[in-house]
Amino acid sequence: MPVRIEIPDGSAAVRQIVTSSSGHDFLEHLIESLKLSDHTDLVHSLTKISSERDADIEDICTNNHQEFVNSVTHLDHARQGCTNLGNDILSLVQSYQTSTDNLAAQKKNLVDSRNVRQNIDDSSEALKECLEVLRLSNQVHDLVAKQNHYAALRTLDELQATLQAREAVRYKIGDLIEKSVPATQKMIAEAVLSDLNTWLYHIRDVSQYIGEVAFFHTEQRRLRQKERMAKDEYLGSFKLNSAIELVADETEEYDVLNNEEAQVNVDFTPLFECLHIHDALGKVDTFRTEFASTRRRQKDLIIPAVLKVTDEDCIELRTLLESITGFTIVENAITKRTNNFRASTDVEELWDAMCQNSATLISNAVATVDDPDVLLRVTSVVALFIQTMQTWNFTSSSLSALLMNIYQKHVKVLSKRTSEDFAEIVDSDDYMPMPINNIEEYDKIIEVGWYVPDKERSDMVFPCVLPFSQMYPMCCIDIRNFLSQVYSGPDDYLQRSSAVDDAIRDSLDQMLCENVCKPLVGLLSSQYPGQIVQIMTNFEYFQQMSLHLQKDLTEARSSRPKGGPVVLNATSQFENGKLTAEKRIFKLVNSKIDDLVETSEYDWSATRKNEAPSNYMTELTAYLSNIMGSVLLGLPDQMKEIIYLDALIHASSNILALPLDRTVTSISPAALHTLNLDVKHLDSYISTIALPEAEQNSDNATLSPARPFSMAFALAGTSSGNNSNVSAATAARATTLQKTLQELTQTLALMSTQDPMEFYDISQRNKKYNAVNPQNGAELLEKVEKGRDGLEPVQQKQQGAMAGIAGGHTNRNSNDLSMEAKLKAGSDRLFGSMRGLSKTGLNIG
């Protein structure tokens, strides 16, 4: 039975070694034990086991000697084997120790190699990271050099992300690059600002050309609008930039900022890039402030210190307004193409500032200009500028007011020149009817003047004379030239303004009143009736011209939104001038009659009768014939009749006043005969006057408006109806003229009567001497009686007669009034009625 070997529990490794079934297991357990514990303890345990086994063997041998011997032999062999095994173990342990040392050395070498390799790998990875960072850094600088700033900024962001993700900042180079990022961002911002400044400088240079292109586009729109107006008059009521005009012109697409035909291409990429980069950098507000400051400085550079407008094409003014236009268009485009970058209030502030500055410059420039052509060119350029900017919804009250002021000055300058021409025309006129030699001259007069001839053109015979003097057509030419210049000057913008109509009306009215009417009224102080007659005729045609001008101005205004009738003060001024001229003619004729009557030199105590009329009487009738047949020939027939009536009334009164003079105390029969002969001569002259016969009946007869001395008797022959006889009318007018001498002839008949007591009989006096003033008649009878008797009158003889005269004077009716008083009263009544008809618009000739 095999002996059981007890193995101490404290050594499990020894147990495994002892109980190993094979050499391989033995070696594995042995090697494992050597690794887990100290080999000295292992040897001690094995020695102990060996001793125990020796004791067991000895015990066994004692009991069983043979077996013991055999066992000893066997044990000896085993011991020998064990010794050998121990030696082998020691050799193995030594070999294991050597292997372990070698293994440890190799492991150390392996660890060192792994560390070196890790360091190499780490270095390689770090190098790769640093190379990537350096690549990105170099790429940023390369992109900045290529002016690809946005890509550079994105690369810089990628570089920062790389530094954070790969922890490259642990390395010195990474830390340096990370610290250089703000400087690189600033470099990018400065580079993009440099590009933006270059772009802004380019925009400043191209702004004037942009404005020029915009002006050209507006002029083309004007032409298209005029073409549409020519086809459809309704479109003429819509101005440029109105909704209708914009719809009608919408097929014409035109971009002033990007136009191949005009070779304009404004690229906003530098601005957008700069804005985007500053947005990425978080510096938009700073950039917005700097950009606004730069644009304000550029705005200041546009406005010059002094402006010159007297050059032929207003180059400086046009350049200024074109630059403002281009600047504002670019600002408007920036506002629309960016989001909250440029506030509309900032752009409007710049626009208002430029408008006010340019308005001040233009006002100062035109302050000393008195050339209407220059003012007209300035007006046209400013109006074109305003209409162009209205396309982009930019308006300026200061420029609109400036435009109106310049145009009003243009009208005033033209008015001043026309007034000077009027003054020269008035001074140089001959105040004679205008002769016309041929049909060409006649056509020119008809073309320029507001003259409606009485005859058809085909009925005219040349040479002929027109009623007005040469000043009338010359003034008409100046007026037409004035209206042509003031109406052809303003473009569509001004033509829609009622202020233009008011300026033209006021200037025209002032010229006619101050430079035509007033000087002509001043010339009425002349002593030449022919000149006054011609002035009165001119007044008539100037009044007709003024009425035509009112109509023309009203028609021109009717197309305006606030049109209305136009009234010229010159119309009434010409009418008043005509009335003044009429009064002046009456005054001159009567003054001449006074002068002639004052030369009568009657000898009231003469004893010899004259057989011929007095010289003054023959001169008086000759004067009336001459002035009516030559000087007053151009007057209307009715006017000449009125002059006749007034002249004869005045002559009769003056002649009757001669014997009533207080210095005349007696009248001899010879003197009475001479006076009677003179009056008969005058009456004979009246009966032979060839008054013009009426061409129409009373329904068609016309009077000049407001005749001051029109007489009711002048129409006596034409008031009976449409079928009144012309010869009867002429006879009636002749009778009317003879009635002007009724008081004078009856007074002379009374003075020549053989029965003066008839005068003191009321019934007889009313039949024969109804036109004689009772007091004058009594006085003249007394003077005639003194002349016959050569004695002092007897008071007693006359007392009863004078009492009868006083009673008759108290009870006399209206027929006892003098003929002169009746005629003048009728004249005043007719004058008032005619003035009323004139105010209602009726034409009375």
Image: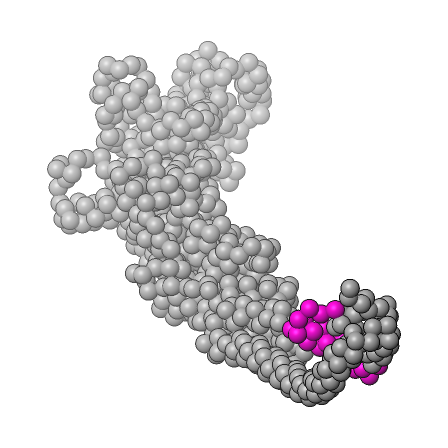
Q: Residue at x 59, y 71 (%)?
A: 162
Of the 4 image quadrants, the one containing the C terminus is top left
On screen, residue 743 above or below 579: above
Is residue 617 rendered to the left or right of residue 515? left
At horizontal 46% and vertical 68% (from top left) the residue drawn is 203
The image shows residue 333, relative to residue 238, as above or below, that is below
Identify the residue shown where x is 23% and y is 45%: 447
Tell me residue 795's x, y (percent): 58, 25
| Quadrant that contains the N terminus | bottom right
Magenta stretch containing residue 386, yes or no? no
Q: Which residue reaches farthest top?
A: 763
- Vertical side of 122 occupied by 225: above or below: above
Q: Is residue 56 left or right of residue 110?
A: right
Closest to the observer: 813 or 251?
A: 251
**Residue 163 rendering spot, x and y as whole percentages:** 62, 73
Q: Is residue 821 above or below residue 228?
A: above
**Which one is in front, 833 or 745?**
833
Judging depth in this view, the residue of 233 and 330 nearest the camera is 330
Instruction: Report the side of 701 relative to 314 (left or right).
Output: left
Look at the magenta stretch and give its main secondary structure: helix
Q: Quadrant of residue 131?
A: bottom right
Magenta-colored span: 19-45
| Residue 59 visible in this rendered orientation of the protein | yes
Looking at the picture, how far across and down is residue 123, in whole percent?
A: 60, 82
